[in-house]
Image (tube, rainbow, N blue to C red):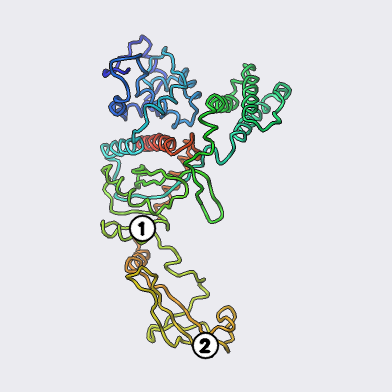
Amino acid sequence: MISNQQSLILSPFMAIYDIVVPKDNMLRQIKDLVDFSFVHEELQNKYCLDNGRNAVPPIRMFKYLLLKSIFDLSDIDVVERSKYDMSLKYFLDMAPEDGVIDPSSLTKFRKLRLKDVNLLDMLIQKTVAIALEKEIIKSRSIIVDATHTKSRFNQQSPIEILKEKSKLLRKSVYQIDENMKNMFPPKTTSNELADELDYCQKVIDSVEKEEALREYPKVKVKLNYLKEIVEDHIEHLQLSNDPDARVGHKTADSSFFGYKTHIAMNEERIITAAIITTGEKSDGKQLQPLIEKSRKTGMEIDTVIGDIAYSEKENIHYANENELQLVSKLHPLITQGNRKKEEEFEFNKDAGLYVCKAGHMAVRRAHTGTKNLGENQRDKYYFDIDKCKQCPLKEGCYKEGAKSKTYSISIKSMEHSEQLAFQEDEFFKEKAKERYKIEAKNSELKHRHGYDVASSSGLIGMHMQGAMAIFAVNLKRILKL
């Protein structure tokens, strides 16, 4: 049960916060900046208003999840820190002497209260609205890109996950006290999940008996992660194949197993839209919904900046229809074909024909492909085969025994021709320099907010993690500006 009324905090110790939480503290600034009542309004239909025990206020539970993202902590560690960190207690609207929640209630809050809530779009819209209200956003451009997040389980078996986590805990213990090697139980030799769980529990018990040892921060964090997985092994291990995660490719030679977050961000580095998909999805296909989502937040857009992935013909057509300038280079296959520069023939504009490296001009031209049937249209230039057979430069150019020698050129569509001309414009070149900003934002999400690895399995969990991480980085950026 939750009350419709916000309860007043009546404590004789509230003045402590004025002493120990300075005005430039980030959490105090976020608390002053954001009216979190929208969380209560959004979630009140998930609670009973007149029956049952009093629930922890949803705003406080939401703030716990935000703190997890800001400081990249586990459920256990964020609750533990809120026992003694006065800035966290102040942010959570608690009196200094108040007790904290049980960490397991955060799992229930995520599963029961945040289910079916479009948290990602709601939180992005909230931060953009704050930025617009504070007149921080001046630009009319958005930068688009995708960042990948590896699955928490990364195609490991449940036993492999347990072995890895227990190994990390043992290593952190040995760095402090090597004698602990004699205190740990012998490793299991079977390949049974139950035996590995039993071994991990014994490792946990061994560390927890050593009071001085378990309080070292690097030991404590790894201990809590292992405990969280063992205690919740049904969720974390039986679903360890992560049914929603997919293999995606960063380059032709490297791949990952997990998810993609497609992001739109303005030049002030505030994220204006995000779409979370499985890892194999194409970046270019998400451009149009990212633009539309950004506009729904109140952003005015006239320029979109992205890499080669966004210069698909459909996106160029969409940009033209919506009076947008798409600063995205065409793929080299479109601009120069799949030939190397040294293999290209020269075009004689007077004759309207190509000339080969030996100086021989084509004898005729033919047009192939039908536009209305969606075929690739090409101009094919034919050379005198008798000359090719005797040519001193025929190696690598003329195939012995071939009955003809041709040189083909793809005919660019009107959209591609216009985009190619736009690429040479000074405006295009200047705006393209802004793209580095989104690379830096992706790095911030991954390295400061734990976004390099999914915190749970499934797209629903990934949406929740993305929502809180993006909300956190947007609030930090607004405070800085």
Question: Tag 1: residue type?
Answer: Val
Answer with left or right where residue 19 lies relative to residue 212: left
User: Any mark on residue 319, and which?
Assistant: none
Residue lying at 32% horizontally and 69% vertically, measured from the top left:
414
Q: Which of 287 and 43 is in front in this view?
A: 43
Decide which of tag 1 and tag 2 comes sooner along the chain.
1
User: Against 236, is 251 above or below?
Assistant: below
Report how far apart the C-alphas of labels 1 and 2 lie in the structure. Answer: 44 Å
Q: In this view, does 212 lie above or below 351?
A: above
Q: Position of residue 295 (x, y in %)?
A: 27, 46
Mark count: 2
Residue 124 figure quarter: top left
- Mark 1 is surrounded, within 10 Å at the Cα level, by few (under 14), some (14 to 19) or many (20 or more) other residues, namely many
| Residue 150 higher or lower than 349, as above or below | above
**Hey, which quadrant is residue 34 in on the image?**
top left
Q: Residue at x 63, y 26 (%)?
A: 200
Q: In the rendered image, which quarter is residue 376 located in?
A: bottom left
Q: Disc 2 designates what residue?
A: 385
Local SS, label 1: strand
Q: Which percent across, then down, holds residue 196?
A: 64, 28
Quadrant location of the N terminus in the rendered image? top left
Name the residue located 41 percent from the left edge and 25 percent from the top edge.
Answer: 64
Vertical relation: 461 (above or below) 266: above
Per the image, the residue denoted by label 1 is: 327
Nearest the eye: 141 or 402:
402
